[in-house]
Image (tube, rainbow, N blue to C red):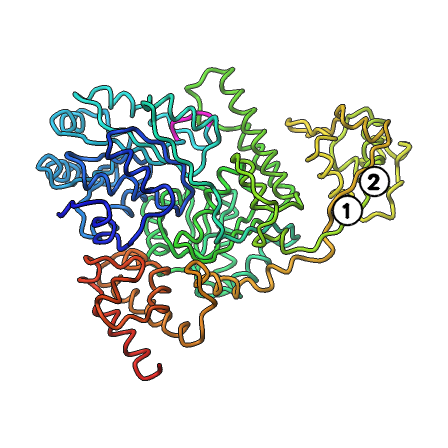
């Protein structure tokens, strides 16, 4: 293998001419022997930051990952690109494991992916202590922090392993989502030495974000799939039961869908995941157990049938759309029941049993605060992208032009009277009730609960009888978001006043709120936005009809090759590479090598077939 320089490796094996933002500085720091921490959103190309140095350093790079699917995917991609790599995890039989370890001892693999649990086993330590380990690259590094959204105690074994090695390797750590507290934890727990820390920014401008509160969530998802047939996507559900219901109904209505959750057998999970990855089934309904480390580049939509428990999880799950940089959509279908479901998950969380009681309660408290911020995302009328970026400490213009709020016309409405009625009702009922009782009281509902609580005698009973219930709830949510109300995090979710409440009740503060004039226009032009997104990522206008036809032919050829090679189609070439072929329309090897994602190794394997396909499709039509 030629290891001349990083640019040669980038082009020959990965097919790119230039590095993306931050990749080069991270690679240079590693090659200088310096520890690094890279915080890069999904799709920003963080794997190249350790794969390229691994091919240039003397010795073996160990990539620590918690995910069997990620290891399998990345090793498959590397082998397809002509780079020897292997993984060591529980999916291998004992015979396969020892065979791979034997090849590793012979120096066959410059890159080995390994599960954290394996690091301190006798067999692996015996190998590592007698081999030059040049670098330990920690993927999904937020798993090391108990304040992170995905803490895994097995990650604490990484430092123990490094300390056992005869000489300390370079340690690089990478994560897609990390708040400041989690970043500090990663540096501290992995004992990174004066690391070069690079944050590329969390923005993924090719992703459209939308929130919809609909009565019939299943109907909304079915309608979305109807207008996006043949497109690859993920439907995330909060519970296994929801996955089963959604999948069963969609199949009954003729949609090609599979499912994934922890209640299925290992064999069925593997089979269903492969059907999705290999494009045999375009859509998968899944719980959050699915997707971490799935490097499928052509996912065009991620729909959430329910709200995740925090923004870290949401952004990570939504970020599985559009990894190729092409246009993609992330839509969250919200219901108030989601808050209760997630609250139960938090209260019954059994993941951190090894922590003492006080620390466990502190983690729960942080989880409740995260849930609150996630809930506010579903209510805000501000730019959704901006809301997410602010959460991670980035500040933009509060207008992205590519989310449901930015594409909705708003007007400012004075909601002072509604606000006073709600706060007054909470105060006069001595802060004893939850949202439903307060809303029903001010609206003048005559229910058994209202009668039994004596709320018909409340001075605010019925004062908002002419205001629609949905509008009263909107204002109540806004007061909660802005700190004028507090909702207790216990089972009863009681509304309490805050000191800010007095600004409205006693000091006559005016409350003005942005409200939608009309339904979002975004969903109407969803598929056309995706088509525009294809060329937009390459600075071009939308596809012509001829280019659309060529793209379909190239995709069919890619599927044919993928079946022959027994690999997922996107490992042959990504959608972005096919898009670039449609623009360049190469006729020669030299022209084909200018296409983003086509390196010499892949050209030698597939290039001629794609050139022939382009000539057949465009030869007499130009």
> Is 225 situated above or below 399?
below
Is the residue 248 above or below the residue 28 in the image? below
Residue 471 marker: 1
Q: Earlier in the sequence, mark 1 or mark 2?
A: 2
| Image mark for residue 479 | none
Label 2: which residue? 418
The quadrant in which residue 72 appears is top left
Residue 235 locus on image (x, y percent):
49, 52
Quarter of the picture holding the C terminus: bottom left
Q: Is 145 one of the magenta-colored residues?
A: yes
Residue drawn at x 43%, y 48% is 320
Q: Is residue 576 magenta?
A: no
Q: Position of residue 298 (x, y in %)?
A: 39, 57
Q: In the image, residue 567 lies at what x, y percent? A: 26, 56
- Most common secondary structure along the magenta stretch: loop
Q: Residue furthest bottom?
A: 620
How packed mark 2 is, by other alpha carbons closer than 10 Å (few <14, some 14-19, many 20 or more), is: some
Q: Locate residue 89: give its quadrant.
A: top left
Residue at (58, 38) in percent of width and height: 374
Q: Residue at x 22, y 37 (%)?
A: 88
Residue 410 to residue 473: above or below: below
Q: Quadrant of residue 479?
A: top right
SS at badge 2: helix
Q: Is residue 488 left or right of residue 142?
A: right
Magenta segment, which residues? Answer: 143-147
The answer to whether mark 1 and mark 2 are in CB contact below 8 A is: yes
Please count the marks in the image: 2
Q: CA distance from mark 1 to mark 2?
A: 9 Å
Q: Secondary structure at mark 1?
A: helix
Report whether 409 appears left or right of 200: right
């Amino acid at each position: 293998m030629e290891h001349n320089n990083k640019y040669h490796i980038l082009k020959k094996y990965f097919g790119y001419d230039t590095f993306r933002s931050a990749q080069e500085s991270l690679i240079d720091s590693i090659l200088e022997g310096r520890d690094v921490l890279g915080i890069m959103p999904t799709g920003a190309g963080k794997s190249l930051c350790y794969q390229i140095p691994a091919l240039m350093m003397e010795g073996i790079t160990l990539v620590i990952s918690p995910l069997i699917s990620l290891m399998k995917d990345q090793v498959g991609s590397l082998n397809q690109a002509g780079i020897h790599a292997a993984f060591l995890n529980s999916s291998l039989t004992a015979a396969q494991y020892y065979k791979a370890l034997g090849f590793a001892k012979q120096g066959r693999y410059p890159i080995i992916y390994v599960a954290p649990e394996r690091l301190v086993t006798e067999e692996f330590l015996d190998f590592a202590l007698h081999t030059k380990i040049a670098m330990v690259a920690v993927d999904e590094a937020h798993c090391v922090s108990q304040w992170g959204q995905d803490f895994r105690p097995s990650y604490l074994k990484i430092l123990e392993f490094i300390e056992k090695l005869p000489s300390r390797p370079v340690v690089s750590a990478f994560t897609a989502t990390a708040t400041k507290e989690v970043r500090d934890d990663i540096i501290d727990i992995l004992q990174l030495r004066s690391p070069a820390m690079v944050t590329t920014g969390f923005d993924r401008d090719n992703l459209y974000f939308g929130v919809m509160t609909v009565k019939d969530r299943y109907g909304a998802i079915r309608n979305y799939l109807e207008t996006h047939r043949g497109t690859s996507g993920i439907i995330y559900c909060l519970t296994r039961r929801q996955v089963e219901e959604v999948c069963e109904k969609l199949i009954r209505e003729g949609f090609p869908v599979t499912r994934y959750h922890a209640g299925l057998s290992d064999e069925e999970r593997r089979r269903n995941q492969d059907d999705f990855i290999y494009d045999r089934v375009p859509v998968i309904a899944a719980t959050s157990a699915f997707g971490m480390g799935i490097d499928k580049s052509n996912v065009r939509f991620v729909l959430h049938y329910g709200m995740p428990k925090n923004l870290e999880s949401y952004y990570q799950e939504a970020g599985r759309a559009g990894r190729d940089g092409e246009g993609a959509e992330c839509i969250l279908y919200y219901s108030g029941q989601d808050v209760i479901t997630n609250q139960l998950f938090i209260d019954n969380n059994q993941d951190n049993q090894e922590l003492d009681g006080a620390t466990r309660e502190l983690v729960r408290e942080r989880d409740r605060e995260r849930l609150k911020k996630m809930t506010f995302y579903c209510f805000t009328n501000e730019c959704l992208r901006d809301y997410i970026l602010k959460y991670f400490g980035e500040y933009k213009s509060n207008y992205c032009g590519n989310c449901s709020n930015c594409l909705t016309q708003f007007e400012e409405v004075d909601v002072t009277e509604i606000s006073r009625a709600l706060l007054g009702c909470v105060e006069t009922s001595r802060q004893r009730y939850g949202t439903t009782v307060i809303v029903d009281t001010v609206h003048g509902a005559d229910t058994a609960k209202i009668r039994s609580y004596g709320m018909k005698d409340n001075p605010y009973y019925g004062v908002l009888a002419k205001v629609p219930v949905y509008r009263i709830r909107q204002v109540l949510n806004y007061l909660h978001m802005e700190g004028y109300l507090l909702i207790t995090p216990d089972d009863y979710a009681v509304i309490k006043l805050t000191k800010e409440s007095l600004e409205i009740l006693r000091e006559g503060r005016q409350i003005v709120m942005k409200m939608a004039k009309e339904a979002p226009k975004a969903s109407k032009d969803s598929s056309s936005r995706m088509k525009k997104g294809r060329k937009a990522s390459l600075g071009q206008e939308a596809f012509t009809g001829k280019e659309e036809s060529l793209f379909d032919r190239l995709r069919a050829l890619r599927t044919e090759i993928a079946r022959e090679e027994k690999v997922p189609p996107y490992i042959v070439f990504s959608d972005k590479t096919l898009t670039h072929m449609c623009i360049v329309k190469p006729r020669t090897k030299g022209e084909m090598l200018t296409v983003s994602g086509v390196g010499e190794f892949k050209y030698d394997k597939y290039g001629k077939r794609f050139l022939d396909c382009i000539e057949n499709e465009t030869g007499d039509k130009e």
